[in-house]
Amino acid sequence: MMRRIVLLFIIGISQFILAFGHSGGEIVVLRIETSIFYGTSDLIARTLRQGYAEGYIIIINTNGGLLKATEEIVDAISSCPARVVVFIPPGGRAFSAGAYIAMASDVVAAANGSAIGACSPVPYSEKEAKAMASWIQSLAESNGRPGDIARRMVTENLVLTSTEAFEAGVVDLLCSNISDLLVEMGWRDMTIINVEPDLKAEFLNMISDPAMAYFLLLSGIFLLMVGLKTPTLIGEGFGVTFIILALYGMGLMQAGWSSTIIMVLGVAVMFLEIKAGHGFFAIGGVMLSLIGLFLIYQGSPFLSPGRKFAASICVGLALGGILSFYLYKVKQVLRRKEKFIDPRKLVGRRGVVKTEVKPGKPGVVLVGSELWTAVSAQTIKEGEEVKVVGVEGLTLKVERSL
């Protein structure tokens, strides 16, 4: 009898400990307070895949983002075994991509002054709008929300205030802040873990932003072309690195073939400026690459060009102008140098071979106080005296002096 009592007591204590442990679980809080790029989707997907928490709260305040990044977030939420709550904070917005993420979540909470909706693709396309409308309707209905209201967010670009969204059933809870939300969800006694963007997320966000990728591309071209005119390996190294990062970012955002080809064509045109040096090719290349950037925005239905595109135009034209001016000045200096040191004046003068000259293999000769590349029809060894008999560009024709 006593043994049974002890056993029952142990079982009771064990249940109490388990219950206590459960009440002390963890709630992970993530924030989306910018446009949705690949750094954000990667961070959210990585966090939700860990699946160690009792629940996840995504605080969302965004005007939109990249379609592919949005799809990755929606997929991560749909496959997460724990409950995922999207909270639109006071004054916050869940527009465009943000609305899709909200409709994919288990619970949508909103504070006063917030809004949700405005999901029409930009630019508007009837075919694309139908596809997007069906998608958001399916997400809403799968989580017990009215699909017709969600569909109107795309077809009519409907925007709802927090109160209107709650009354329509699009929003599940009205909460003033995170503390109220935790109480409503029964998570008041849980441990809160705030997940901040790490270095990987910040890096991916930077290069998958079309405006930043464009800036990296132009900066890379600028540094590379300056490096080619004044070789130091530093300019070339940074230039090539920036160009690779820009192209990688364009690959992440899945830029279409047309936009990529136009951007690459713009780069090729800019490189013609090295020979021309009058500015036309530099500015023309910048304009072509800007058209490519615009097409990238056109292919991102959740991302509006806005101020970033306007800033990209200003930066592009400024860099194009600086590059044109620099190459023009370099060309002027080279012309003056050629005029000042006219190699044709060296015909008839004598010099000394510094590096052996062989037929078909140029060498180096010292004539006056300058070192020159030299060619000869005969082998002339180092240290022998030569005579300049002709000039080809900046290369001297020499023969052994008698």
Image (tube, helix red, strand yellow):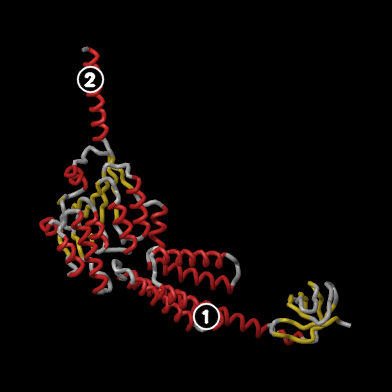
Q: Check residue 76 in the rendering and tell me which mark sits there, or answer none.
A: none
Amino acid type at circle 1 is: Glu
Labels in figure, total: 2
User: In the image, residue 257 lies at what x, y percent?
Assistant: 41, 73
* Quarter containing the C terminus: bottom right
Q: Is residue 19 above or below residue 47?
A: above
User: In the image, residue 359 lies at what x, y percent?
Assistant: 80, 79
Q: Image quarter for residue 261?
A: bottom left
Measured in 3D between alpha carbons, the distance from the residue under mark 2 to the one under mark 1, in whole angstroms, is 87 Å
Is 128 on the left or on the right of 279, as rendered?
left
The local secondary structure at tag 1 comes to helix
Q: Check residue 273 in the rendering and tell me which mark sits there, or answer none.
A: 1
**Residue 381 or residue 25, whichever sits in front:** 25
The local secondary structure at tag 2 comes to helix
Q: Is residue 88 above or below residue 221?
A: above
User: In the image, residue 245 lies at what x, y percent?
Assistant: 46, 64
Mark 2 highlights which residue? Answer: 9
Q: Image quarter for residue 390?
A: bottom right
Q: Which residue is farthest right?
A: 402
Does the image show residue 225? yes
Amino acid type at circle 2 is: Phe
Which tag, 2 or 1, sits closer to the chain's start?
2
